[in-house]
């Protein structure tokens, strides 16, 4: 379909976005079919991002009921249905837009998510974070190491090199970690207290006697074994702080259970 406008013809395609992809749309475009006007023959990826949806959030595109890739060109008159990640529906025969399975519990976070990085590590997830990273570095790490990029920056998700990403809807870190676990269905792969919250290394079990001098005097001799980070050498042991962290984990994972 094409309509005349001053200076040339303008083409139109009907789009419909599903489920959480509507979070990126203005209220008057959510959960309904709407016309999108354009010139030339843009790719469906460029059109989706022009509408406001970052491409890493998209897992399936149907153009006139046929699955297509991001490079499919629009000519006007099509009906385009855009879907997010599928949890329970088998779409293996269709054109999945992610080169490999998305659900790898490895993350890279943008520079504003330091507290979330600690929470993810507390739950045992391999999480790369550095407040000195720029956007280009974060995007490159996501691609090279196949890490899912977590961010509140839609522009960062729209970078061409990013293929795996999730835009956080919540602002508070405690709600963000609960959101990530729920949205990516990670409850079954949580491994609490298996990773250093500070430097991300996997903790190792060591004999208490081998690190006794590094423990507070009042705790020496109370444990047979403790956990130690091989990177920064921090020690972790069951104590009052451990009980507080257990309570924190319970609260974090229960936010979206209702």
Image: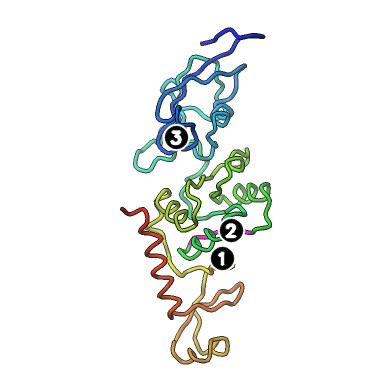
Q: Who's the residue at 65% across and 48% down the image?
A: 140
184 or 178, which is in the foreground? Answer: 178
Q: Residue 216 in the image: x percent, y percent?
A: 53, 87
N-terminal-most mark, 3 or 2: 3
Q: Which mark's residue is nearer the viewer, 3 or 1?
A: 3
89 or 155, which is in the foreground? Answer: 155
N-terminal-most mark, 3 or 1: 3
Q: Which mark is residue 128?
A: 2
Q: Residue 136 in the image: x percent, y percent?
A: 68, 47
**Callout 2 environment at 10 Å: few (<14), some (14 to 19), or many (20+)?**
some
For label 3, the residue is: 22
**Callout 3 environment at 10 Å: few (<14), some (14 to 19), or many (20+)?**
some
Q: Who's the residue at 64% across and 8% down the image?
A: 6
Give the residues in magenta. 125-130
Real-space Cα distance between discs 3 and 2?
Answer: 29 Å
Which element carries disc 2, helix, strand or loop?
A: strand
Horizontally, residue 166 falls left or right of residue 9, namely left
Q: Who's the residue at 60% across and 54% down the image?
A: 112
Asked if the residue at tag 2 contacts the one at tag 3, i.e. Cβ–Cβ closer than 8 Å, the answer is no
Q: Which mark is residue 100?
A: none
Real-space Cα distance between discs 1 and 2?
Answer: 7 Å
């Amino acid at each position: 379909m094409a309509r005349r406008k001053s200076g040339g013809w303008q083409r139109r395609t009907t789009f419909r976005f599903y489920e959480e992809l509507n979070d990126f749309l203005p209220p008057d475009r959510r959960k309904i079919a709407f016309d999108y006007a354009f010139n030339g023959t843009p790719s469906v990826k460029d059109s989706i991002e022009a509408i406001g949806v970052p491409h890493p959030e998209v897992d399936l595109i149907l153009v006139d009921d046929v699955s297509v890739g991001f490079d499919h060109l629009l000519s006007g008159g099509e009906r385009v249905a855009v879907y997010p990640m599928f949890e329970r529906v088998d779409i293996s025969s269709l054109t999945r837009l992610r080169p490999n399975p998305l659900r790898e519990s490895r993350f890279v976070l943008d520079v504003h998510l330091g507290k979330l990085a600690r929470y993810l590590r507390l739950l045992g997830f391999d999480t790369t974070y550095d407040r000195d990273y720029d956007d280009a570095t974060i995007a490159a790490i996501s691609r090279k190491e196949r890490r899912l990029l977590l961010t509140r920056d839609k522009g960062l998700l729209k970078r061409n090199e990013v293929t795996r990403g999730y835009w956080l809807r919540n602002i508070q870190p405690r709600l963000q970690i609960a959101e990530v676990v729920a949205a990516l269905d990670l409850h079954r792969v949580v491994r609490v207290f298996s990773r250093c919250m500070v430097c991300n290394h996997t903790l190792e079990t060591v004999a208490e006697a081998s690190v006794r001098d590094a423990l507070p005097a009042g705790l020496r001799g109370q444990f047979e074994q403790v956990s130690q980070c091989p990177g920064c050498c921090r020690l972790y042991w069951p104590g009052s702080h451990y009980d507080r962290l257990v309570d924190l984990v319970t609260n974090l994972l229960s936010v979206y259970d209702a």
